[in-house]
Image (spheres, rainbow, N blue to C red):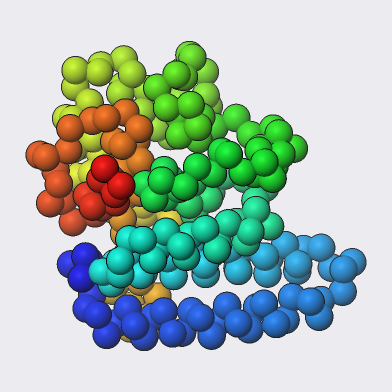
């Protein structure tokens, strides 16, 4: 077990339930009239979301990272099918997970085509794509409006460890507007883990020392160091 909130049986139940939901959506999707674009889009989003949540739940449960990496690679087509110009939390977390699992999503030609098609301009994604070679980090709207602390990582490189530690301390509270906030407190098995994948991926690509927060309950330490 990696998660400190729920136990093994909880996650087994959660994953079984989600797999049944995934099977339903996959079987139902081909039956939808092609003219019903909104319904098709909604179902593709659901398929991607379930795939992502199951991968995270398997990490929470303590599954082997190599097997999780295989599951991630299998989920990439569903990610591409659901991708749009709206970079929501799950989209960003999925891309962050590629960094942590050493899957170079930016070598995927179909994904690169989608980035161009939707004219994606997202500072954190650009960091994941080009590592530290980011020019004018403050020009990205997502960073200026929602993640000024990411700009600080570049402006104050000597304080990176402290900046990350502070963000981890605020991680759960910062997700109050996210759909999964509070899932661990409801009776129905909806919780899949509160891992700070975006923060962890930044730690990895920017080579930030992480010994001081390696045991933080939302920090996936072994993912950051997966593959050396």
Taking the spot 76% from the left edge, 67% from the top edge, the residue there is 40
Please identify the quarter of the rendering in which residue 81 is found. bottom right
Q: Is residue 101 left or right of residue 83?
A: left
The answer, for residue 192, to whether it is visible in the render is: no
Q: Position of residue 61 (x, y in %)?
A: 28, 72
Q: Position of residue 220 (x, y in %)?
A: 26, 52
Q: Is residue 107 left or right of residue 151?
A: right
Quadrant location of the C terminus? top left
Residue lying furthest left? 212
Taking the spot 71% from the left edge, 39% from the top edge, the residue there is 113
Count of numbered circles on the image: 0
Q: Is 102 or 205 nearer to us in this picture?
A: 102
Quadrant location of the N terminus? bottom left
Taking the spot 11% from the left edge, 40% from the top edge, the residue there is 211
Q: Position of residue 57 (x, y in %)?
A: 36, 69
Q: Is residue 209 above or below residue 151?
A: below
The answer, for residue 185, to whether it is visible in the render is: yes
Q: Is residue 28 left or right of residue 134?
A: right
């Amino acid at each position: 077990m990696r998660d400190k909130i729920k136990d093994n049986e909880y996650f087994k139940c959660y994953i079984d339930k989600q797999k049944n939901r995934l099977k339903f959506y996959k079987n139902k999707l081909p039956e939808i009239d092609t003219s019903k674009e909104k319904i098709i889009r909604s179902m593709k989003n659901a398929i991607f979301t379930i795939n992502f949540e199951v991968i995270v739940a398997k990490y929470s449960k303590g599954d082997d990272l190599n097997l999780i990496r295989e599951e991630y690679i299998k989920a990439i087509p569903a990610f591409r099918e659901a991708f749009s110009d709206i970079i929501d939390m799950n989209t960003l977390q999925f891309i962050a997970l590629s960094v942590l699992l050493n899957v170079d999503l930016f070598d995927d030609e179909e994904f690169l085509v989608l980035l161009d098609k939707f004219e994606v301009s997202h500072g954190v994604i650009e960091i994941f794509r080009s590592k530290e070679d980011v020019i004018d980090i403050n020009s990205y709207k997502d960073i200026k409006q929602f993640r000024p602390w990411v700009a600080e990582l570049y402006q104050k490189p000597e304080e990176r460890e402290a900046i990350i530690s502070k963000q981890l301390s605020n991680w759960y509270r910062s997700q109050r507007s996210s759909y999964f906030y509070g899932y661990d407190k409801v009776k129905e098995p909806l919780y899949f883990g509160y891992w700070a994948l975006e923060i962890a991926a930044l730690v990895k690509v920017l080579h930030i020392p992480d010994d001081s927060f390696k045991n933080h309950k939302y920090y996936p330490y072994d993912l950051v160091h997966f593959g050396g």
